[in-house]
Structure formats: C-alpha cells, structure tokens
Amino acid sequence: MRFSARTYSRVTFAALVLLCAIVVTGAAVRLSGSGLGCADWPRCNSQKFIDVSSTHGAIEQVNRLFTGLVAAGVALAVLGSYRLSERRRDLVRLSWGLVAGVVGQVVLGGVVVLTDLHPLANQGHFVLSMILVSTATVLWERSRADLASELAEPATIAPLARRLVGGVVIGAVVSILTGTVVTGTGPHAGDEEARRFGFDIESVARLHGSAVLVTIALLLGLIVVVRRRSDSWERLGGPLEALLAVAVVQGTVGYVQYFNDIPAVLVGVHVAGATALMIAVVRLAFRVFSRRTSGAGVLLGTR
C-alpha cells in the first residue's frame, strides 16, 4: 500500500493530536492525586500487571494504556514515511525522532514512578513531551500537501523580524521551563507524600509570570514589524495571530489560577494551553527558519 502526500499529512496530524492528548491525560493523573495509583512499573503493582480496583489506580492505568494508542499513531507515521509515493528523507528522520521520544517517555515514566514522583523526574517528563509535540508539529508541517502553494514564493523577512522571532521562541521556552518549576513547587504533586521543590511559590510564580509578559511584549513588537511588509504579513499573519491568542489566554488562565489558590481544573487547562503554545511557536518558527533556498520544492523535498 502506498500513501499519498495528503493521506500521510492526515496520519501525521493524528499522531500530533494523540501526543497532545497524552500530555493532558498525564496532567489528569497528577491533578487527581493518582500519580502513585500504580506503585510499580511496568506492572501496576506486585500482584497485578493491570489493576483498576481503585479510582487512583484506574486513572493511572488508563493513562498508561493510552500510551498504546500513541505508539500506534507514531508507528503508522514511520510506516507511512517509507510508503509514500515519493519517499522523503526528512519525513523518515522526523518520524523516527517520534519513536525515540516515545521510548524516552516510557523510560521516564518508569523513573517518575520508581522515584516516587520526584519533581525533577516529573519536570523532565513534561519537557520531553513538549519536545515530542514540537517534533510532531514540524513533521506535520513538512508533510502538508497544500504547503507547496503556500510557500511557492518565499517571503522576504526583515532581519529585525527574524531576531524577534528568535526572541519569542526563547521566551516561550523559558516560560514553559519556569512553569514546570512552579508546578514542581505547587500543591499538585500527584500524591500527598510526593517531594516538592523547596522554592517559595510566590517567587517562582513571579519569575514565570515575568517570562510570559516579556514573551508577549516581544510578540507584539514582532507583529508591528511584520505588518509593515504585506508579503511578510501574508506569510506570517495567521501564525502570529494564533500565537498571540494562545499566549493571551494562557497568561490570563495563569493569573486566574494563581489568585484562586491554584484549582486543579484550571491547572489542567493551563497544561493544555502550554501544549497549544508550543505548537503555535513551532509553526511560526517553521515559516521563518525552515530551509527553502529554491522555494517550496526544497521545503517539501521535491527538488
């Protein structure tokens, strides 16, 4: 069986959706206090491989089993990259990168359980999730059949705009990293007995909030610069508007949850927002920094 470019693009999008979903289900495990619902790994406990006899155990077990769907989606992305009508090395490499990331997540998941939810292990688990989501986003973007017409004539991006895009990317990464420190310091550890970072919650929350505000300021400056050129805005306007919307909503949710004693539901929304923010940032950076020396043909692997 051969995959058309459009079919493979749908496969990569499905893999991206599954990788985002497992970030949210993983957050649900932590926020429901089910992090040690299964006290062993890869078995649920010393008696049973699968045990859903308790609520916490069931929540943790469902999240683990959902990994199977993610693995299937990633495997299909790898298979499809080899079965494309015109095989492309960039898609093969990126799809195998997803495999490496999923394997790493399985190992880190075991470390999280075996270290009794150590905050550093949890932090690494989430950071790797963001790397996986970013890789899947690039894979999807590069596989899109309609990208050829969209990028047929490369836009001229002003040097200042490029630097600002780099600043936005760095700011978003710092925001997410400081956000994991806030989570590792706050009340939702996944279990009442789990260790926490010994930082002052107000200090780390203020640091995280400052990183978010700086990122939004850089983004607004970038929008002003890009709007001066019609061809640049035509290329980057959509991704910029999407990123701004996600960033504003994410910042608002962050402040609301902080001033309302960090309710679990809003923390879950914030985790989903961080995932959406990562996708929006990667899509913007892709349009600015992706190699396209001879138009969309190079970008899509057809030249």
Image: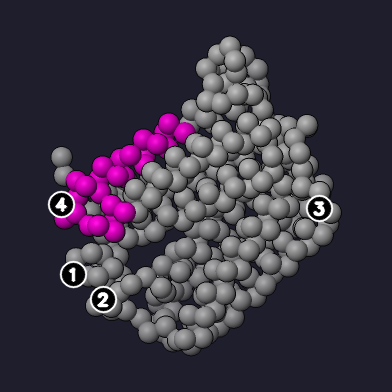
User: Which mark is nearer the camera, 3 or 4?
Assistant: 3
Vertical comparison of 135 with 44: above or below:
below
Query: Which residue is identified by label 3?
Result: 199
**Is 41 positioned to the left or the right of 231 in the image?**
right
Query: Which residue is identified by label 2?
Result: 295
Query: Which residue is identified by label 4?
Result: 85
Residue at the (29%, 59%) spot, across then down: 90
Vertical comparison of 103 with 81: above or below:
above
Q: Residues within 10 Å of mark 1 (few under 14, many from 20)?
A: few
Between discs 4 and 2, the one toward the N terminus: 4
Between discs 1 and 4, the one toward the N terminus: 4
Point out the stretch of residues depicted in magenta: 67-93
Give residue 141's position: percent from left, percent from top: 36, 60
| Type of secondary structure dominating the magenta stretch | helix
Q: Considering the numbered disc 2 on the image, is that residue within a helix, a strand or a loop?
A: strand
Disc 4 + disc 2, Cβ < 8 Å: no
**Is 248 positioned to the left or the right of 6 in the image?**
right
Q: Considering the numbered disc 4 on the image, is that residue within a helix, a strand or a loop?
A: loop
Please give the count of numbered marks on the rendered protein: 4
Query: Which residue is identified by label 1?
Result: 303
Q: Amino acid at mark 3?
A: Phe
Report how far apart the C-alphas of labels 1 and 2 lie in the structure: 9 Å
Q: Residues within 10 Å of mark 3 (few under 14, many from 20)?
A: few
Q: Amino acid at mark 1?
A: Arg
Between discs 3 and 2, the one toward the N terminus: 3
Q: Residue furthest top?
A: 47
**Front residue of this view, candidates 244 and 172:** 172
